[in-house]
Amino acid sequence: MEEIIPGIFRIKVPMPNPEAFMGYNNAYLVRDDRGTLLLDPGFNNDRAFQHLEKSLGEIGVSFRDITHIFVSHVHSDHYGLVLRLKKLSGARLYLHRLEKDLITARFVETEMLLKQTIEAFGINGVPPAELPELEDVVYNRSKRYMSKPVFPDVMLEGGEEICTGRFTFRVVWSPGHSPGQICLYEPAQKLLLSGDHILPNITPNIGLYPESGANPIGDFIGSLKEIQELDVDLILPGHEDPFRGLKERIDFLMRHHDKRNRNIIDALQPEAGTAYQVAARIPWLTNEGGCAWTALSAIDKRLAMFETLAHLEFLCSRGILEKFRNNGSVYFRLS
Protein backbone atom coordinates (compact mmCIF):
# COMPACT_ATOMS: atom_id res chain seq x y z
CA MET A 1 0.00 0.00 0.00
CA GLU A 2 1.24 3.49 -0.79
CA GLU A 3 -0.23 6.96 -0.51
CA ILE A 4 0.00 8.59 -3.94
CA ILE A 5 -1.08 12.02 -2.72
CA PRO A 6 -2.76 12.84 0.61
CA GLY A 7 -6.07 10.96 0.62
CA ILE A 8 -5.48 8.70 -2.41
CA PHE A 9 -3.93 5.27 -1.87
CA ARG A 10 -2.76 2.52 -4.20
CA ILE A 11 -3.19 -1.11 -3.11
CA LYS A 12 -1.51 -3.92 -5.05
CA VAL A 13 -4.09 -6.72 -4.99
CA PRO A 14 -2.58 -10.13 -5.84
CA MET A 15 -3.83 -12.07 -8.84
CA PRO A 16 -4.10 -15.87 -8.98
CA ASN A 17 -1.68 -16.08 -11.91
CA PRO A 18 1.57 -14.41 -10.79
CA GLU A 19 2.97 -14.38 -14.34
CA ALA A 20 0.26 -11.94 -15.50
CA PHE A 21 0.56 -8.17 -15.13
CA MET A 22 3.42 -8.51 -12.60
CA GLY A 23 1.14 -10.64 -10.40
CA TYR A 24 -1.20 -7.93 -9.16
CA ASN A 25 -3.74 -5.33 -10.16
CA ASN A 26 -4.06 -1.87 -8.66
CA ALA A 27 -7.00 -0.94 -6.48
CA TYR A 28 -7.29 2.72 -5.51
CA LEU A 29 -8.86 4.07 -2.34
CA VAL A 30 -9.97 7.68 -2.02
CA ARG A 31 -10.44 8.63 1.63
CA ASP A 32 -12.16 11.98 1.84
CA ASP A 33 -14.43 14.22 3.94
CA ARG A 34 -17.72 13.20 2.33
CA GLY A 35 -17.11 9.59 1.43
CA THR A 36 -14.66 6.76 0.81
CA LEU A 37 -14.36 5.57 -2.77
CA LEU A 38 -12.78 2.28 -3.88
CA LEU A 39 -11.89 1.69 -7.54
CA ASP A 40 -11.36 -1.84 -8.91
CA PRO A 41 -11.19 -3.99 -5.76
CA GLY A 42 -9.62 -7.00 -7.47
CA PHE A 43 -9.94 -10.71 -8.11
CA ASN A 44 -12.40 -12.84 -6.17
CA ASN A 45 -10.32 -15.18 -4.07
CA ASP A 46 -9.44 -15.33 -0.39
CA ARG A 47 -5.85 -14.20 -0.85
CA ALA A 48 -6.91 -11.04 -2.66
CA PHE A 49 -9.69 -10.37 -0.15
CA GLN A 50 -7.41 -10.78 2.86
CA HIS A 51 -4.71 -8.58 1.32
CA LEU A 52 -7.25 -5.86 0.55
CA GLU A 53 -8.67 -6.04 4.08
CA LYS A 54 -5.18 -5.82 5.62
CA SER A 55 -4.19 -2.87 3.41
CA LEU A 56 -7.37 -0.97 4.21
CA GLY A 57 -6.68 -1.55 7.91
CA GLU A 58 -3.23 0.01 7.52
CA ILE A 59 -4.95 3.10 6.12
CA GLY A 60 -7.42 3.08 9.01
CA VAL A 61 -10.41 2.09 6.89
CA SER A 62 -12.78 -0.86 7.28
CA PHE A 63 -15.09 -2.28 4.63
CA ARG A 64 -18.00 -0.59 6.42
CA ASP A 65 -16.43 2.81 5.73
CA ILE A 66 -16.59 2.40 1.93
CA THR A 67 -19.44 4.43 0.42
CA HIS A 68 -18.71 4.19 -3.33
CA ILE A 69 -17.38 1.24 -5.33
CA PHE A 70 -16.37 2.11 -8.89
CA VAL A 71 -15.33 -0.54 -11.42
CA SER A 72 -13.49 0.55 -14.55
CA HIS A 73 -14.73 -2.55 -16.41
CA VAL A 74 -16.06 -5.97 -15.45
CA HIS A 75 -13.05 -8.17 -16.19
CA SER A 76 -12.61 -10.42 -13.18
CA ASP A 77 -9.31 -8.93 -11.99
CA HIS A 78 -11.14 -5.62 -11.44
CA TYR A 79 -14.71 -6.67 -10.67
CA GLY A 80 -14.36 -10.00 -8.89
CA LEU A 81 -14.52 -8.88 -5.24
CA VAL A 82 -17.45 -6.52 -5.69
CA LEU A 83 -20.14 -8.85 -4.34
CA ARG A 84 -18.23 -9.56 -1.13
CA LEU A 85 -17.52 -5.87 -0.59
CA LYS A 86 -21.08 -4.75 -1.23
CA LYS A 87 -22.36 -7.21 1.36
CA LEU A 88 -19.84 -5.97 3.93
CA SER A 89 -20.03 -2.25 3.18
CA GLY A 90 -23.45 -1.48 1.76
CA ALA A 91 -21.64 0.79 -0.71
CA ARG A 92 -23.23 1.76 -4.00
CA LEU A 93 -21.76 0.20 -7.13
CA TYR A 94 -21.02 2.47 -10.12
CA LEU A 95 -20.50 1.04 -13.62
CA HIS A 96 -20.94 2.20 -17.17
CA ARG A 97 -24.27 0.98 -18.52
CA LEU A 98 -22.57 -1.07 -21.27
CA GLU A 99 -20.74 -3.11 -18.64
CA LYS A 100 -24.10 -4.16 -17.19
CA ASP A 101 -24.73 -6.08 -20.42
CA LEU A 102 -21.33 -7.73 -20.08
CA ILE A 103 -22.17 -8.90 -16.56
CA THR A 104 -25.14 -10.74 -18.04
CA ALA A 105 -23.09 -12.17 -20.92
CA ARG A 106 -20.07 -13.23 -18.87
CA PHE A 107 -21.53 -14.27 -15.52
CA VAL A 108 -25.22 -15.09 -16.11
CA GLU A 109 -25.50 -16.41 -19.68
CA THR A 110 -22.02 -17.92 -19.54
CA GLU A 111 -22.74 -21.07 -21.53
CA MET A 112 -24.19 -19.05 -24.39
CA LEU A 113 -21.11 -16.83 -24.50
CA LEU A 114 -18.80 -19.84 -24.46
CA LYS A 115 -20.74 -21.36 -27.35
CA GLN A 116 -20.50 -18.09 -29.32
CA THR A 117 -16.75 -17.92 -28.69
CA ILE A 118 -16.21 -21.49 -29.90
CA GLU A 119 -18.30 -20.75 -33.00
CA ALA A 120 -16.20 -17.63 -33.63
CA PHE A 121 -13.06 -19.76 -33.80
CA GLY A 122 -14.50 -21.79 -36.67
CA ILE A 123 -15.98 -18.82 -38.52
CA ASN A 124 -12.65 -16.99 -38.35
CA GLY A 125 -10.59 -19.83 -39.73
CA VAL A 126 -9.07 -21.75 -36.83
CA PRO A 127 -7.95 -25.12 -38.27
CA PRO A 128 -9.97 -28.09 -36.94
CA ALA A 129 -6.82 -29.65 -35.46
CA GLU A 130 -6.28 -26.60 -33.21
CA LEU A 131 -9.88 -26.20 -32.06
CA PRO A 132 -9.75 -28.61 -29.09
CA GLU A 133 -6.82 -26.78 -27.46
CA LEU A 134 -8.46 -23.38 -27.91
CA GLU A 135 -11.77 -24.71 -26.62
CA ASP A 136 -9.98 -25.97 -23.50
CA VAL A 137 -8.46 -22.51 -22.99
CA VAL A 138 -11.88 -20.87 -23.19
CA TYR A 139 -13.57 -23.28 -20.79
CA ASN A 140 -10.68 -23.29 -18.30
CA ARG A 141 -10.48 -19.49 -18.26
CA SER A 142 -14.23 -19.30 -17.77
CA LYS A 143 -14.04 -21.53 -14.69
CA ARG A 144 -10.96 -19.76 -13.32
CA TYR A 145 -12.22 -16.22 -13.85
CA MET A 146 -15.88 -16.70 -12.99
CA SER A 147 -17.35 -13.99 -10.74
CA LYS A 148 -20.73 -13.97 -9.06
CA PRO A 149 -22.88 -11.35 -10.79
CA VAL A 150 -23.78 -8.13 -9.02
CA PHE A 151 -25.44 -5.34 -10.97
CA PRO A 152 -24.77 -1.61 -10.59
CA ASP A 153 -26.75 0.68 -8.34
CA VAL A 154 -25.73 3.59 -10.57
CA MET A 155 -25.25 3.23 -14.33
CA LEU A 156 -22.88 5.75 -15.83
CA GLU A 157 -22.77 7.29 -19.30
CA GLY A 158 -19.62 9.39 -19.03
CA GLY A 159 -19.40 13.03 -18.04
CA GLU A 160 -20.79 12.57 -14.52
CA GLU A 161 -18.96 14.20 -11.60
CA ILE A 162 -18.56 12.57 -8.20
CA CYS A 163 -17.49 14.79 -5.31
CA THR A 164 -15.99 13.02 -2.30
CA GLY A 165 -15.07 16.25 -0.49
CA ARG A 166 -11.70 17.63 -1.51
CA PHE A 167 -11.73 15.65 -4.74
CA THR A 168 -14.15 15.82 -7.65
CA PHE A 169 -13.81 13.04 -10.21
CA ARG A 170 -15.17 13.22 -13.74
CA VAL A 171 -16.20 9.96 -15.38
CA VAL A 172 -14.57 9.56 -18.81
CA TRP A 173 -16.10 6.84 -20.98
CA SER A 174 -13.14 5.10 -22.66
CA PRO A 175 -14.30 2.15 -24.80
CA GLY A 176 -11.89 -0.20 -26.53
CA HIS A 177 -10.48 -2.75 -24.10
CA SER A 178 -14.06 -3.18 -22.90
CA PRO A 179 -17.20 -1.49 -24.26
CA GLY A 180 -17.96 0.32 -21.01
CA GLN A 181 -14.43 0.95 -19.74
CA ILE A 182 -14.25 4.18 -17.74
CA CYS A 183 -11.46 6.37 -16.40
CA LEU A 184 -11.75 8.79 -13.48
CA TYR A 185 -10.24 12.25 -14.00
CA GLU A 186 -9.50 14.66 -11.16
CA PRO A 187 -8.75 17.98 -12.90
CA ALA A 188 -7.61 19.97 -9.86
CA GLN A 189 -4.96 17.34 -9.05
CA LYS A 190 -4.33 16.53 -12.74
CA LEU A 191 -4.82 12.84 -11.96
CA LEU A 192 -6.17 10.16 -14.30
CA LEU A 193 -7.20 6.78 -12.89
CA SER A 194 -6.98 4.93 -16.19
CA GLY A 195 -8.05 1.32 -15.50
CA ASP A 196 -6.77 -0.84 -18.37
CA HIS A 197 -7.31 1.87 -20.98
CA ILE A 198 -3.78 3.25 -20.76
CA LEU A 199 -0.93 1.30 -19.14
CA PRO A 200 2.71 2.41 -18.93
CA ASN A 201 4.31 -0.53 -20.77
CA ILE A 202 1.70 -3.11 -21.70
CA THR A 203 -0.45 -2.48 -24.76
CA PRO A 204 -4.04 -3.31 -23.74
CA ASN A 205 -5.66 -6.14 -25.67
CA ILE A 206 -8.29 -4.65 -27.99
CA GLY A 207 -10.12 -7.66 -29.39
CA LEU A 208 -13.38 -8.18 -31.24
CA TYR A 209 -15.01 -10.82 -29.05
CA PRO A 210 -18.64 -11.96 -29.23
CA GLU A 211 -19.47 -9.61 -26.33
CA SER A 212 -17.50 -6.65 -27.75
CA GLY A 213 -18.77 -3.57 -29.51
CA ALA A 214 -18.84 -3.55 -33.31
CA ASN A 215 -15.57 -1.61 -33.80
CA PRO A 216 -13.38 -1.71 -30.68
CA ILE A 217 -10.24 -0.39 -32.42
CA GLY A 218 -12.17 2.61 -33.70
CA ASP A 219 -13.64 3.12 -30.23
CA PHE A 220 -10.21 2.86 -28.62
CA ILE A 221 -8.56 5.35 -30.98
CA GLY A 222 -11.43 7.80 -30.56
CA SER A 223 -11.30 7.63 -26.77
CA LEU A 224 -7.51 8.01 -26.76
CA LYS A 225 -7.87 11.23 -28.73
CA GLU A 226 -10.42 12.51 -26.21
CA ILE A 227 -8.20 11.71 -23.23
CA GLN A 228 -5.18 13.27 -24.93
CA GLU A 229 -6.93 16.63 -24.59
CA LEU A 230 -7.05 16.36 -20.77
CA ASP A 231 -4.56 18.20 -18.58
CA VAL A 232 -2.96 15.24 -16.78
CA ASP A 233 0.23 15.12 -14.74
CA LEU A 234 0.05 11.63 -13.21
CA ILE A 235 -1.65 8.46 -14.48
CA LEU A 236 -2.75 5.78 -12.00
CA PRO A 237 -3.17 2.62 -14.12
CA GLY A 238 -4.97 -0.64 -13.40
CA HIS A 239 -1.69 -2.59 -13.72
CA GLU A 240 1.99 -1.71 -13.35
CA ASP A 241 3.17 1.51 -11.70
CA PRO A 242 1.90 5.12 -11.78
CA PHE A 243 3.57 7.11 -14.54
CA ARG A 244 3.78 10.48 -16.26
CA GLY A 245 3.82 11.44 -19.93
CA LEU A 246 0.21 10.82 -20.98
CA LYS A 247 0.46 12.44 -24.40
CA GLU A 248 3.65 10.55 -25.25
CA ARG A 249 2.13 7.24 -24.17
CA ILE A 250 -0.99 7.86 -26.25
CA ASP A 251 1.18 8.77 -29.24
CA PHE A 252 2.96 5.42 -28.82
CA LEU A 253 -0.33 3.50 -28.64
CA MET A 254 -1.62 5.25 -31.76
CA ARG A 255 1.59 4.40 -33.64
CA HIS A 256 1.37 0.80 -32.43
CA HIS A 257 -2.13 0.33 -33.82
CA ASP A 258 -1.28 2.17 -37.04
CA LYS A 259 1.67 -0.18 -37.52
CA ARG A 260 -0.58 -3.18 -36.83
CA ASN A 261 -3.00 -1.92 -39.50
CA ARG A 262 -0.13 -1.64 -41.98
CA ASN A 263 1.09 -5.15 -41.08
CA ILE A 264 -2.38 -6.50 -41.84
CA ILE A 265 -2.67 -4.65 -45.15
CA ASP A 266 0.73 -6.04 -46.18
CA ALA A 267 -0.32 -9.54 -45.11
CA LEU A 268 -3.36 -9.34 -47.40
CA GLN A 269 -1.41 -8.16 -50.47
CA PRO A 270 -0.78 -11.69 -51.82
CA GLU A 271 -4.21 -13.16 -51.10
CA ALA A 272 -7.34 -12.95 -48.95
CA GLY A 273 -7.38 -14.56 -45.53
CA THR A 274 -9.41 -15.30 -42.43
CA ALA A 275 -8.62 -13.55 -39.15
CA TYR A 276 -6.67 -16.61 -38.04
CA GLN A 277 -4.67 -16.77 -41.28
CA VAL A 278 -3.86 -13.06 -41.18
CA ALA A 279 -2.82 -13.29 -37.51
CA ALA A 280 -0.42 -16.09 -38.44
CA ARG A 281 1.22 -13.87 -41.11
CA ILE A 282 2.04 -10.85 -38.92
CA PRO A 283 4.63 -10.33 -36.11
CA TRP A 284 3.71 -10.73 -32.42
CA LEU A 285 5.36 -9.91 -29.08
CA THR A 286 7.57 -7.39 -30.85
CA ASN A 287 8.39 -5.65 -27.54
CA GLU A 288 9.99 -8.92 -26.44
CA GLY A 289 12.02 -9.45 -29.59
CA GLY A 290 9.27 -11.06 -31.64
CA CYS A 291 7.78 -14.52 -31.64
CA ALA A 292 6.83 -16.94 -34.40
CA TRP A 293 3.11 -17.72 -34.61
CA THR A 294 3.77 -21.42 -34.06
CA ALA A 295 5.58 -20.61 -30.80
CA LEU A 296 2.64 -18.72 -29.28
CA SER A 297 0.63 -20.44 -26.56
CA ALA A 298 -3.02 -21.26 -27.17
CA ILE A 299 -4.01 -18.36 -24.87
CA ASP A 300 -1.84 -15.94 -26.86
CA LYS A 301 -3.19 -17.25 -30.18
CA ARG A 302 -6.72 -16.62 -28.93
CA LEU A 303 -5.86 -13.03 -27.94
CA ALA A 304 -3.96 -12.45 -31.19
CA MET A 305 -6.75 -13.76 -33.43
CA PHE A 306 -9.45 -11.63 -31.80
CA GLU A 307 -7.20 -8.56 -31.85
CA THR A 308 -6.46 -9.16 -35.54
CA LEU A 309 -10.20 -9.48 -36.15
CA ALA A 310 -10.74 -6.11 -34.45
CA HIS A 311 -8.19 -4.50 -36.78
CA LEU A 312 -9.71 -6.18 -39.83
CA GLU A 313 -13.15 -4.83 -38.95
CA PHE A 314 -11.66 -1.38 -38.34
CA LEU A 315 -10.06 -1.42 -41.80
CA CYS A 316 -13.38 -2.53 -43.30
CA SER A 317 -15.07 0.44 -41.61
CA ARG A 318 -12.54 2.70 -43.37
CA GLY A 319 -13.23 1.11 -46.76
CA ILE A 320 -9.69 -0.29 -47.02
CA LEU A 321 -10.79 -3.92 -46.76
CA GLU A 322 -13.90 -5.89 -47.57
CA LYS A 323 -15.07 -9.24 -46.27
CA PHE A 324 -16.81 -12.20 -47.83
CA ARG A 325 -17.86 -15.71 -46.86
CA ASN A 326 -16.47 -18.91 -48.30
CA ASN A 327 -17.24 -22.44 -47.04
CA GLY A 328 -18.63 -21.11 -43.77
CA SER A 329 -15.66 -18.90 -42.90
CA VAL A 330 -15.27 -15.11 -43.13
CA TYR A 331 -12.42 -13.88 -45.33
CA PHE A 332 -10.95 -10.40 -45.78
CA ARG A 333 -9.31 -8.86 -48.84
CA LEU A 334 -8.16 -5.46 -50.06
CA SER A 335 -10.97 -3.34 -51.49
Image: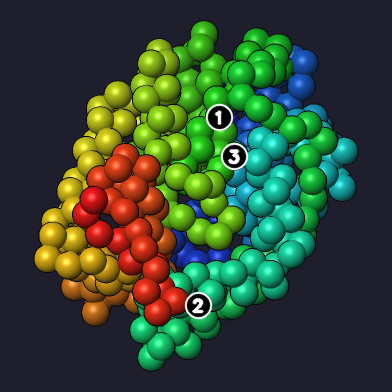
Dot placed on the residue nearer the N-terminal end, 2 or 1 = 2
Task: Judge by depth and name the residue closer to the eye, 39 or 293.
Answer: 293
> Mark 3 falls on what kind of element?
loop
Residue bearing mark 2? 137
Can residue 58 be seen from the camera position used here?
A: no
Q: Are dots 3 and 2 in contact, CB under 8 Å?
A: no
Q: Badge 2, how many Cα within 10 Å: few under 14, some, many 20+?
A: some
* Residue 63, above or below 15: above
Q: Position of residue 151 (x, y in %)?
A: 79, 46
Query: From mark 2 to mark 1, how far is it between C-alphas?
Result: 30 Å
> Mark 1 falls on what kind of element?
strand
Q: Are dots 3 and 1 in contact, CB under 8 Å?
A: yes
Task: Judge by depth and name the residue closer to the eye, 64 or 129.
Answer: 129
Residue type marked 2: Val
Nearer the viewer's eye, disc 3 or disc 2? 3
Q: Badge 3, how many Cα within 10 Å: few under 14, some, many 20+?
A: many
Can residue 24 be seen from the camera position used here?
A: yes
Task: Judge by depth and name the residue closer to the eye, 6 or 217.
Answer: 217
> Mark 2 falls on what kind of element?
helix
Residue bearing mark 3? 180
Query: From mark 3 to mark 1, how far is it between C-alphas?
Result: 7 Å
Res 133 quadrant in image: bottom left
Dot placed on the residue nearer the N-terminal end, 3 or 2 = 2
Dot placed on the residue nearer the N-terminal end, 3 or 1 = 1
Residue type marked 3: Gly
Label ID, residue 173: 1
Residue type marked 1: Trp
